[in-house]
Image (spheres, rainbow, N blue to C red):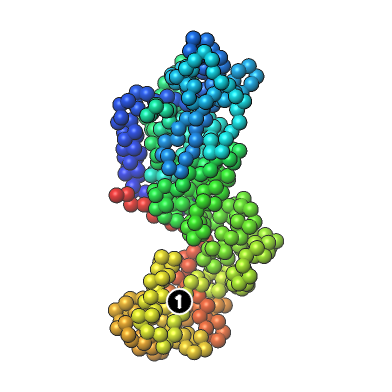
Amino acid sequence: MLRPPLPGRRVLRELRHQRSRRLLAVRTIREALISLAGLLDRPVRNQAGAEVGKLVDVVARWATDDAYPPVTGLVVRIGGRRAFLAADQIAQVDPREVRLRSARFDLRDFERRPGEVLLARDVLDHQLVDVEGVKVIRAADLYLAPIEGSHRLVGVDVSLQTLLRRLGPARFRSLPTPDRVIDWAAIQPFAGDEGQVPLRTWKQGLQRLRPGELADLLEDLGRSARLELLASLEPDTAADALEEMEPRELEALLHEAPPERASALLASMEPDEAVDALRSLSEGEREELLDRMPPETARHLAGLLDFPSDRAGGFMTTSLVRVSRLETVADVRERLRALAERQPDLDTVAVVDERGRLVDVVSVLELFVADPGERVAALTRAPGPVAINADASLEEVAEGLTEARESTLVVVDDLGRPLGRILADDVIDALLPERGRLRFPRLLQ
């Protein structure tokens, strides 16, 4: 995938360092950090100091309104049994052992409860999304700290040094090495292997991500995580992200998703993007997905699939605004405002006559400097626009764009009725299908 160099990498590194300093600036937290990786298989002792078992895992509760998940208990191995020890029975968690409040305590068979996650099993060494850094990370270690009377998950470490520490001598495994610790408040986790752990509500940071950034995350995540992320997005947001994905990655995702989900996603995408994705599938797969779509959407996409991919109708964009000559400028402006968020690349409107035939193309700029009460007909000019037939070849499309000296070329049927439009970008994509999509870096404030 070809992408421009990212001049903001230094800024991203500085942002990560700032987040690390933000978390570690509180001295009491920095000094009290407990490495989860170092704590595993450590002894659990009663009040008298006698060992009752070995720590297997730490249980935390995901909550939609809690940035730092609280520890709700421990999973302890006692002989051949895995038992649950509730958090209120814990007196102290030391990097090398756990102390209980009493010599007498209640041990129950472990059973995962709704909303709980096993930090070692479900999170350690698993993929996560760093919301602020806009990247997929893998948890090399997790850090716990005592906060307001309870132990909480406060950070995730992604450094190579930490991985080496875990592979080294046992005496070093419990020593935190938070060189690249990320504040847990900036992390988006995913469900555990059991599929019983709900995602936290999307943070504002993730909601602000651009479609291209979400596409990058989807491409980098594993199968279950990306399906979960995708399922949590609003349909329009998910469709925008899919439109930015690399064709091979999008094809893989459509194969991974249940057919009903894949068809719903395709139906939400821009028709030309959906058609491109459908072309990559086998005929049987296309038919199955089209059968699951609303009939009108399926008919529209099937009609576009009938055009050869190397002809104007095969790579045109069907997002086109058709307006009557009798409409007022004010009316058209309102329509464009309503479409601006969903179709930000609209730069022209197609003016049609009573039979739906193309009369002229008027730029958005012309509409917004014209008198609001004026009829659209007053903005049209003879001899009319340069248009291209849906059966035109790629070379003819390129010639038409050159002749028109515009960034948009309208595609018409045999009767002169507009079907869609072709942008200069569409021609480049058709000429260089292997170049991939260009995504520009996010500007950090």
Which residue is more in the foreground, 196 or 342? 196
**Left-right relation of 80 to 379:** right
Q: Residue 418's spot in the image, x, y percent?
A: 50, 80
Q: Residue 94: image x %, image y %?
A: 43, 19
Closest to the observer: 356 or 400?
356
Q: Is residue 205 above or below residue 31?
A: below
Residue at left 52%, top 22%? 40
Visible in this render: residue 383? Answer: yes
Q: Amino acid at mark 1?
A: Val
In the image, taking residue 225 as reference, residue 27 lies left or right, namely: left
What residue would you read off at disc 1? 321
The answer to which of 407 and 192 lies nearer the viewer is 192
Residue lying at 55% horizontally and 86% vertically, measured from the top left: 415
Q: Residue at x 47, y 17 (%)?
A: 101
Q: Residue at x 42, y 87 (%)?
A: 325
Residue 214 spot, x, y in % from top left: 46, 52
